[in-house]
Image: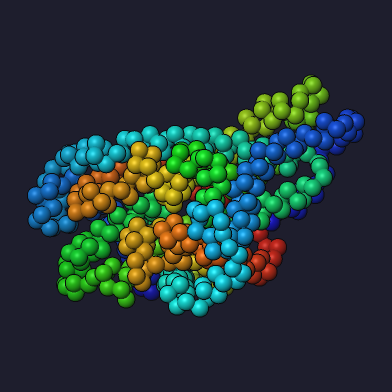
Amino acid sequence: MTVRASLTALKYLSLVAAAAVVLLPLLTMFSTSFKTPQEMAEGDILAPPANWLNLENYRVAFENGNMLAAFGNTAFILLFSITGTILIGSMAAYAIDRFRFRLKKVVVALFLVATLVPGVTTQVATFEVIDAFGLFDTRWGPILLFMGTDIVAIYIFLQFIRNIPVSLDEAARMDGATSFTVYRKVILPLLKPAVATVVIIKGITVYNEFYIPFLYMPSEELGVISTSLFRFKGPFGAHWEVISAGAVLVIVPTLVIFLALQRFVYNGFTAGATK
Amino acid sequence: MVRTSARTSRPAPPSRHAAARPSRWRRATPWLYLAAPLIMLGTFTYVPVVSMLSYSFTDWDGVSPDRAYVGLDNYVRLFTRPELFSVFATSLYYLVAALVQIVLALYFAAVLSFETRFRSLFKGVIFFPYLLNGVAVAFVFLYLFQPGGTLDQVLGLAGVDAGILWLGNPDLANVSLSGVSVWRFMGLNFVLFLGAIQSVPSELHEAAMLDGASRPRVLWHIVIPSIRPIISLSLILGVAGSLSVFEIPYIMTGGSGETKTFVIQTVKLAFQFNKTGLASAAAVVLLVVILLITWVQRRIVPEERTPSA
């Protein structure tokens, strides 16, 4: 029994240690974001701020750090790339699951092989494609890249569409519906859970993406939250209280989404990763 | 995605094909839905792969209209110039980190698969870093690793006053950076493993427990073997991931010196030094390596499906 008790103690000890390792870096950043430059100069990082309501650093982050524009740009890109991903993914899944046509195996293989190509490796050449379309340094370049290469979304839609009984399509067809009406009135509404999953994982992925906006949108006014926060490094290099406020601003929406939609988040990311 | 090809052989809904004459229009219908996805796929995946291959045999600088064919020169340079090749050494740190990450994830998944107080709280806390923005994570850890920063102060509380340069010391920088990578990505492995463990039929371990097997033994002999597919998938993703590290070192140290990774080098070659040809060759090498690794994985775990959580 004592062995079991000490094993249990070890288990909780390791869990608490893990939680501390995760939370300590985040919490120090959070507390730093409320400190004044004078408090920072004292150098006691672990001390709590004198005033937890000191929002001065957040004001600076918003006004001088371009964070407001960054959230706007991120929202714009999110809106279009998520909508596009949903339409493209669900249409591809609809065609693949509900129609019989020649070359279907080839089409499926094309999508499968593409999952193996890591995006980071091809950017050297993708850059030329975006540039040729005249989309370099516009928000549309990243939007197209985000919606054009999301095979995980197609996979998630395929999984859900298979569970929608074909008899529903047929009933609608009997009533004279075209294939597009079936897609729009029968399939899409029933795909709502899949849409929710795709919105969440796509949303979080696009929100966190650094590499693509960094490469394709160098203009400062096109900064998204990742790239704008990255640019804090220059002007605020020594002002950790402002950088902290910026980082907290970026983290809080993620935290809220996670707390509100936990189950969807877990399911979405596990479905996406085990494709 | 393995299942896709198997499932597509399922006969399509019969009524439609029996009732309607296969007019030309009918046959075109699926292509109407596939047009946009396929055009996007071609434009942003296959065109770049092909043009990258063709650039890799030239000395193109990415700007000028003309380029000369140089054969395999770029590839030879990649493998013979030590300063270009050394980036693979950096990957080794991340490779070790990926292994550590998988072991830790397995441990916590095993622990939390039992009755535990605050179970969902611990699960959430361990997973949460995976969701965070990479730039924010990089800043959080730049702050943590600063001389006199959080880490030094916490160590100071424990009586250790080493004054370690976590990022400034070239021997240590990669260890610190790959530690950040473990912090950030362990949560996904953990949640995948936890889901897999929970989908192992409970009769299996209950029977073993009745036979007097201890919990660790049950874990080792019954649970771990039955989630082997997901463990091997994680290993492969870990290897591929350790070759494609970019964000964290690029933001935290600028990818200078020892901390330069393969992808950072490729990006710098292409976009700072205008060596598109050489950068393309590097990208082709990485692509081939990753395809090879994936191929090996598919061979090792052929038809086994990873249990979805």
Q: Nearer the viewer, residue A206 or B192?
A: A206
Q: How many marks?
A: 0
Residue A249 in which image quadrant: top left
Residue B121 screen position, x and y as percent? 38, 51
Rendered position, A137 above or below B223: above
Residue A113 screen position, x and y as percent? 66, 56
- Write the residue at 64% across / 56% down: B50
Residue B229 screen position, x and y as percent? 61, 65
Residue B224 screen position, x and y as percent? 56, 68
Q: How is the image coloured?
A: rainbow
Does residue B262 appear in this view? yes
- On-image quarter of the N terminus of chain A: bottom left
- Write the residue at 68% across / 69% down: B299
Does residue B154 appear in this view? no
Rendered position, A91 above or below A159: above
- Write the residue at 71% across / 28% down: A180
Name the side, left or right, on which B56 lies relative to B87.
right
Q: Nearer the viewer, residue B206 or B249?
A: B249
- On-image quarter of the C terminus of chain A: bottom right
- Write the residue at 45% across / 46% down: A216
Q: Nearer the viewer, residue A275 or B225?
A: A275
